[in-house]
Image: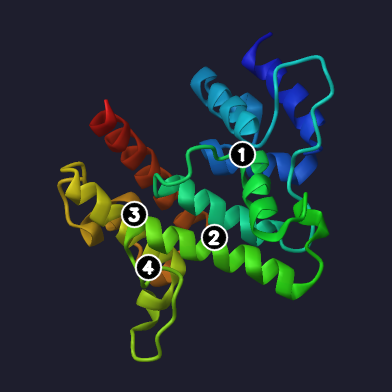
Amino acid sequence: MTAHALIHVGLKKLGIAGDDARDLYERVTGARSLRAMTPPQHQAVVDELERLGFKRSSRPMPAKRATGSYAGKLQALWIAGWNLGIVRDNTDAAMLAFVKRQTSLGHSRFLRAPDEAARAIEALKAWLRRETGNDGLYRWEKQRPKLLNDCRFQILLTQWAWLAARDAAPAASLDAWVERMQAGRTYADFGRDDWIDLMNVLGLRLRKAMAKAEA
């Protein structure tokens, strides 16, 4: 089956359609239609669908996607861990196993009570702080500049520090690298997708550096 056909199958199995599908295309490739993409971009979309849970099988896909009021927050933290090289399995199934260990609840859709959700969320934050050695990660301090209280920037700084420790950081400084990556815009101009793009790029570089060191 071609990548183009796999995309249609994957979208259907994951329940993604219309603008949601076009938003996914744009986030992954910069193009909002399959017709405007190159074959490597088609494959990149297939890879993203597989990351989201699509399996190349005729069997029904198991219900292992996170749902519920707190799923988005948990997924964001889990993917942050993936981009920090801490999480080794970036699927919702792995995240749900973590939630179950922390709350004894079998699925994130059962996290209806704020205290139950907070237990899972704070446990995940604490784990990321412990594994990175960055006690300021996901913390807010009144005396710090606003940017340093932005958890997305905290992740970016942590990624950069880990890359530098492994001699794998880009040659330019963090500010210069970000400016080049984002066409001269400042951090204040960044939207959600800009932050995701930066963390994904550094995350891929960091995972490669860590795998090389382990080998």
Mark 3 touching mark 2, by CB under 8 A? Answer: no
Question: Is residue 28 depicted above or below 75 in this figure?
Answer: above
Residue 211 placed where, x, y %? 32, 31
At a point 26% along the width and 51% down the height, the residue shown is 162
Q: Earlier in the sequence, mark 2 or mark 1?
A: 1
Q: What number is the disc on residue 183? A: 3
User: Which residue is denoted by mark 4 in the rendering?
Assistant: 187
Q: Earlier in the sequence, mark 1 or mark 3?
A: 1
The label nearer to you, 2 versus 1, is: 2
The label nearer to you, 1 versus 3, is: 1
Name which residue type carries label 2: Leu
At a point 46% along the width and 70% down the height, the residue shown is 138
Q: Residues within 10 Å of mark 2 (few under 14, many from 20)?
A: many
Mark 2 touching mark 4, by CB under 8 A? Answer: no
User: Which residue is denoted by mark 2 in the rendering?
Assistant: 124
User: Which residue is denoted by mark 1 in the rendering?
Assistant: 91
Name which residue type carries label 4: Tyr
Q: Residues within 10 Å of mark 3 (few under 14, many from 20)?
A: few
Q: Determine the secondary structure under disc 1.
A: loop
The label nearer to you, 3 versus 4, is: 4
Residue 193 placed where, x, y %? 52, 54
